[in-house]
Image (spheres, rainbow, N blue to C red):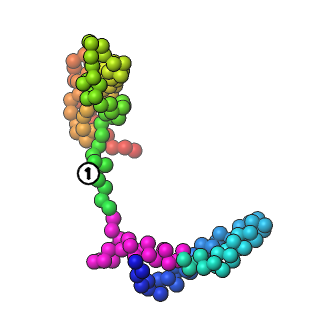
Amino acid sequence: MQTVLPQEAIEEAIGEVREVMRQYTACADPTESAARKERLRQAEEQVEVEEAAIQMVQANLENLSPTDGRRQRESPTPASRERVPATLRLGPQVSLVDEEDNISEGRRPVSLERIDTLKLNLFYSAQRLGPLIDPMETEDLPLMDGRSETTVKRKPG
């Protein structure tokens, strides 16, 4: 599929490629600088600079919306916006379905015993972390001996 690309955009892209290549060849080591200039000369002979510029223009045109000319942005998935509790992140997600179906002769697979240990560890980690509270609220928090203590929000600084 060959599309007609605006010549002005191609010329601008060629200018950008040449500017980047000029910066690339201007290094402190004279031997490396000469080698880079030679690679640039060979790339220009083989029309690689123009091909790179055309690819830049095509990629830019593909990213533009045909209706408003702005770049389309993908919205993050709803799952990535959700906050995952720390207790769920502390241990691996393990599927029990296959192994529970295959239990025979009253013996439990080792992996199920490991899962029980993981569940116990998650329980203890939840105890270490304490209750889930909204940090933006001021409320009475129960202490270990049954009393309560009022927390006061303070401004940082």
Residue 115 highlighted magenta (yes or no): no
Q: In which quarter of the image is the N terminus?
A: bottom left
Local crowd size for mark 1, using a 10 Å CA cut-off: few (<14), some (14–19), many (≥20): few
User: How many numbered callouts?
Assistant: 1
> Magenta span covers which residues?
52-73
Task: Return the x and y of residue 110 as percentages of the image width and height.
Answer: 36, 18
Residue 71 highlighted magenta (yes or no): yes
In this orientation, which residue lies closer to the viewer: 150 or 67? 67
Task: Return the x and y of residue 65 as percentages of the image width and height.
Answer: 32, 74
Q: In which quarter of the image is the C terminus?
A: top left
In this orientation, which residue lies closer to the viewer: 4 or 98? 98
For image coordinates 24% across by 38% down, the residue present is: 134
For image coordinates 23% across by 28% down, the residue present is: 141
The answer to whether residue 98 is seen in the rendering is yes
- Element at badge 1? helix
Up/down of 48 relative to 157, above or below: below
Up/down of 131 relative to 59, above or below: above
Which quadrant of the structure image shows residue 59? Answer: bottom left
Residue type pointed to by label 1:
Pro
In this orientation, which residue lies closer to the viewer: 157 or 66? 66
Task: Return the x and y of residue 106 as percentages of the image width and height.
Answer: 26, 12
Please indicate whether residue 146 sits to the left or right of residue 29 in the image. Answer: left
Return the residue at label 1: 78
The answer to whether residue 130 is seen in the rendering is no
In this orientation, which residue lies closer to the viewer: 27 or 110? 110
For image coordinates 29% across by 25% down, the residue present is: 99
For image coordinates 33% across by 33% down, the residue present is: 93
Up/down of 157 relative to 67, above or below: above
Task: Return the x and y of residue 2 as percentages of the image width and height.
Answer: 42, 80
